[in-house]
Image: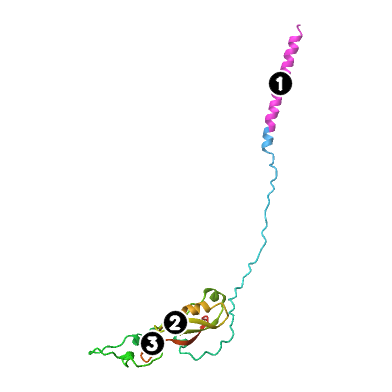
Amino acid sequence: MSLRVPLAMMLAAVITFGLFWTMQALIGVAGELKDAKPPPKVEFVRLKRDTTPQEKKREPPKRAKPEQAPPPPDISVSKASLSPTTDFAAVTPDIDASGALDGGLAAGAGSDRDAVPLVRIEPDYPLRARQRGIEGWVHVEFTISKSGTVIDPVVRGANPQGVFEEAAVAAVSRWKYNPKIVNGIPVERPGQQIIFPFEMEN
């Protein structure tokens, strides 16, 4: 019994010393961990290829040249008179102090005259044809009524077909005339013809 107590105390002292030594060793390792080098980082870099910009050449739309227009028929209107005009002198007579009429109506009821244009409107250039650079012409025949309006417009020819006919007929249908007078009576004037050129400005 007398030896067990000293041995137990010595064993406890050794174990205690071992524990303290182990703790000291762990503390020393912690300082070494701070000096440890971090693991290498792998970075991915995308390389951009050098590209030279390419210039795109834009060419203007090519104009489709129509076939040669037929010779204009013998008509009473001309291309130069396609702008909207109104001949007010032909419709507004002068009145003198005695109340007599002068001007176009002063010749009496038996005077004859041909139809006189009052209002002429140019046709609108179709938007799709303008964007595509298409040019052409339309030949229209019509009749001047007794009241001076245009009736029965008919397309006699067009190039290219199916492009400008609608615009030409719409324009000529809005024209106004002083009707033809025969023996003092207004009559119809058939067989009127006009060629509308559709040309783009340069």
Provide the residue designation for mark 3: 186
Residue nearest the observer in this picture, 180 or 82: 180
| Label 2 packing within 10 angstroms: few (<14), some (14-19), many (20+) | many
The first of marks 1 and 2 along the sequence is 1
User: Where does residue 110 sit, x and y in percent of width and height?
Assistant: 34, 93
In the rendered image, the vertical position of residue 62 relative to residue 73, given as above or below: above
Question: What is the quadrant of residue 82 in the picture?
Answer: bottom left
Q: Amino acid at mark 1?
A: Phe
Distance in Å between CA atoms under marks 2 and 3: 14 Å
Q: Which residue is mark 1?
A: 17
Q: Is residue 160 magenta?
A: no
Q: Position of residue 39 (x, y in %)?
A: 70, 43
- Residue projecting furthest to the left: 97
Read off the residue under disc 2: 150
Residue situated in front as seen by the camera: 87 or 53: 87
Dominant secondary structure of the magenta stretch? helix
